[in-house]
Amino acid sequence: MVFNIKKELKILRHMTTKQLREKYLEVFSEQTRSGNKDFLIKRIAWRLQANHEGGLSERVLHRAAEMANDSDLRIRMPKMFDTNAISSTNRTTTKDFPIERDPRLPCPNTVLTRKYKGQDIEVTVLENGFDYQGATFRSLSAVAKEVTGSHWNGFAFFQI
């Protein structure tokens, strides 16, 4: 029987996923969980070619078995991951970290001004935010967005 891989690939490409799954069962003698058509085509084509041309050599199979035996395979979960072994001292804790002020910002109570579309914009720098027209904003970018209606880098908008 003459084996033509190109002909086999053409046939496989015209099969539905269901037909490919059936062909996979026929070729590998086991079910596949995959529903990916490209994957199934590649695997089936590889197996058909390997069956026709002899597959991997005994030397390669023997070397692969040696490598698998040398690998460190875990059968049980390490004790440090055992949920019963976790004590209260090992648990994650949270701490409050002080938020450092951006060094580009002026001192609190400084008033930043900018002329925008003929209007004077005044923003007061607070310890934790910015005051604009009685509302507190977390960032200069939020103030710039409130003023312009679009996103701006706050430092660029106020030319700091």
Image: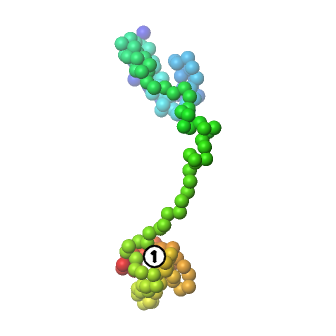
Say whether residue 30 is left or right of residue 59.
right
For the C terminus, give its image quadrant: bottom left
Residue 120 seen from this side: yes
Instruction: Check the image and report above or below for 129 versus 13.
Output: below
Instruction: Check the image and report above or below for 53 versus 153.
Output: above
For disc 1, the marked residue is 140
Residue that protrudes farthest toward the right in the picture? 84
Residue 8 seen from this side: no
Badge 1 density bin: few <14, some 14–19, many ≥20, Cα 10 Å? many
Q: Residue at x 55, y 17 (%)?
A: 29
Q: Position of residue 85 (x, y in %)?
A: 60, 38
Say whether residue 58 is left or right of residue 14.
left
Q: Amino acid at mark 1?
A: Leu
Q: Residue at x 54, y 59 (%)?
A: 95
Q: Residue at x 53, y 86 (%)?
A: 133
Q: Nearer the viewer, residue 141 or 44?
A: 141
Instruction: Check the image and report above or below for 139 versus 132.
Output: above
Q: Nearer the viewer, residue 10 or 98?
A: 98
For the N terminus, give its image quadrant: top left
Q: Position of residue 116 (x, y in %)?
A: 42, 85
Determine the image quadrant of residue 106. Answer: bottom left
Q: Count of labels shown?
A: 1
Q: How is the image coloured?
A: rainbow
Residue that protrudes farthest toward the front in the picture? 89
Q: Nearer the viewer, residue 46 or 64?
A: 64
Q: Position of residue 94 (x, y in %)?
A: 55, 57
Determine the image quadrant of residue 72. Answer: top left
Say whether residue 31 is left or right of residue 45.
right
- Find numbered disc 1 in the image and state the secondary structure of the residue it sits on: helix
